[in-house]
């Protein structure tokens, strides 16, 4: 290789590494700007009363988002209860039992479902749950969030299960146990770290969803009145307060946005911790 070619490749390598470094720095700076700006705008309303007080009537100063924070946790739990079993079973089926054609079709369907805009999911949940029940409710919101979660859990579970060495499958079957028992007792525990990571990522995804809740949960100023009644949620309240003409509610919207970012950030840190445990 001539010296000229070597120098050209060397400089090209440096340029590409530099571009990669710039892209990584841009992502970090963008995250820092979002966090900093959101905190700066919402710091005035971020206090203990914001966390433990209910929202005040329109025009009154003060109050908080206690009911909305509690409602968000309820909706996330509902969505997880509905989505995790379906997603896990779909991932197990594709990874361990489906023939190649069926597996390809299921993967394609999951990828398409994951790419559907969340507002379309909200409209769909409105049509199949809200209209037949003649009421907005926490259940309908949970169904909408579960639809968003299922493909994420299914795809991550499948990929995690496929990373388990075939030798473990063969060893389990050689002991004379059934294939299903081998999956439950050997393969799933071997992929548990990846499965948990996927579940946490799916939870982080639905925690900040707003569009589906507009068509399903609707929102409520009266706290949790039951799973068959409208329910408040942090993203919904942020949306409503951000459109409010009152400065105090606008500040609370920024404070709620910062709290939501902290929630997603905490889940992301938990995901990294779970992932790193696999290598310990």
Image: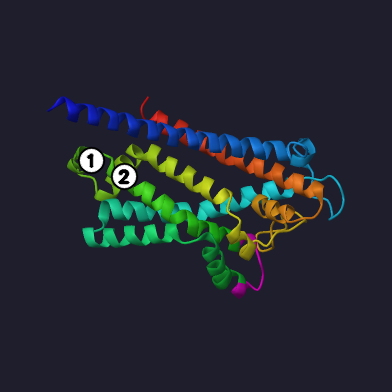
Identify the residue at horizontal 21%, vertical 41% (top origin): 166
Q: Secondary structure at mark 2?
A: helix
Give the residue at the far front of this rendering: 4
Q: Position of residue 93 (x, y in %)?
A: 31, 55
Identify the residue at horizontal 50%, vertical 61% (top origin): 117
Q: Quadrant of residue 224?
A: bottom right
Q: Which mark, by number, is residue 161?
A: 2
129 with respect to 191 (left or right): right
Give the residue at the far left of this rendering: 1
Q: Position of residue 199 (x, y in %)?
A: 46, 45
* Region in magenta: 131-139
Q: Is residue 134 magenta?
A: yes
Residue hosting label 1:
172
Which sits in the foreground, 57 or 100? 57
Q: Position of residue 235 (x, y in %)?
A: 65, 51
Do the residues bearing badges 1 and 2 touch, measured as CB atoms within 8 Å?
A: no
Q: Quadrant of residue 46?
A: top right
Give the residue at the far right of this rendering: 60
Q: How many marks?
A: 2
Identify the residue at horizontal 67%, vertical 70% (top origin): 135
Colour setup of the view: rainbow
Q: Earlier in the sequence, mark 1 or mark 2?
A: 2
Q: Quadrant of residue 187?
A: top left
Q: CA distance from mark 1 to mark 2?
A: 15 Å
152 with respect to 265 (left or right): left
Is the C terminus in the top left, top right, bottom left or bottom right quadrant? top left
Say whether residue 211 is visible. Answer: yes
Say whether residue 65 is visible. Answer: no
Q: Position of residue 244 (x, y in %)?
A: 77, 55
Q: Secondary structure at mark 1?
A: helix
């Amino acid at each position: 290789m001539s010296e000229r070619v070597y120098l050209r490749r060397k400089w090209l390598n440096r340029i590409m590494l530099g571009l990669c470094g710039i892209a990584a720095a841009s992502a970090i700076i963008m995250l820092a700007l979002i966090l900093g700006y959101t905190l700066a705008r919402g710091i005035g309303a971020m206090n203990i009363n914001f966390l433990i007080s209910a929202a005040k009537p329109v025009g009154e100063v003060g109050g908080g988002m206690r009911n909305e924070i509690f409602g968000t946790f309820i909706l996330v739990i509902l969505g997880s209860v509905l989505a995790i079993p379906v997603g896990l079973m779909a991932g197990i089926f594709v990874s361990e039992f489906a023939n190649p054609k069926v597996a390809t079709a299921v993967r394609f369907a999951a990828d398409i479902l994951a790419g559907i805009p969340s507002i379309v999911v909200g409209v769909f949940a409105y049509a199949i749950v809200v209209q037949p029940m003649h009421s907005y409710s926490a259940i309908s919101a949970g169904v909408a969030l579960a639809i968003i979660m299922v493909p994420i859990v299914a795809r991550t579970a499948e990929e995690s299960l496929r990373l388990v060495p075939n030798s473990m499958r063969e060893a389990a079957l050689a002991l004379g146990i059934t294939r299903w028992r081998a999956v439950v007792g050997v393969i799933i525990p071997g992929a548990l770290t990846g499965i948990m990571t996927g579940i946490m990522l799916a939870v982080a995804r639905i925690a900040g969803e707003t569009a589906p809740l507009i068509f399903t949960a609707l929102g409520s100023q009266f706290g949790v009145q039951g799973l068959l009644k409208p329910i408040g949620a942090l993203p919904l309240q942020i949306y409503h307060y951000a459109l409010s003409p009152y400065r105090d509610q606008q500040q609370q919207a920024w404070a709620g946005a910062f709290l939501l970012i902290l929630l997603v950030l905490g889940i992301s840190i938990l995901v990294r911790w779970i992932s790193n445990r696999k290598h310990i």
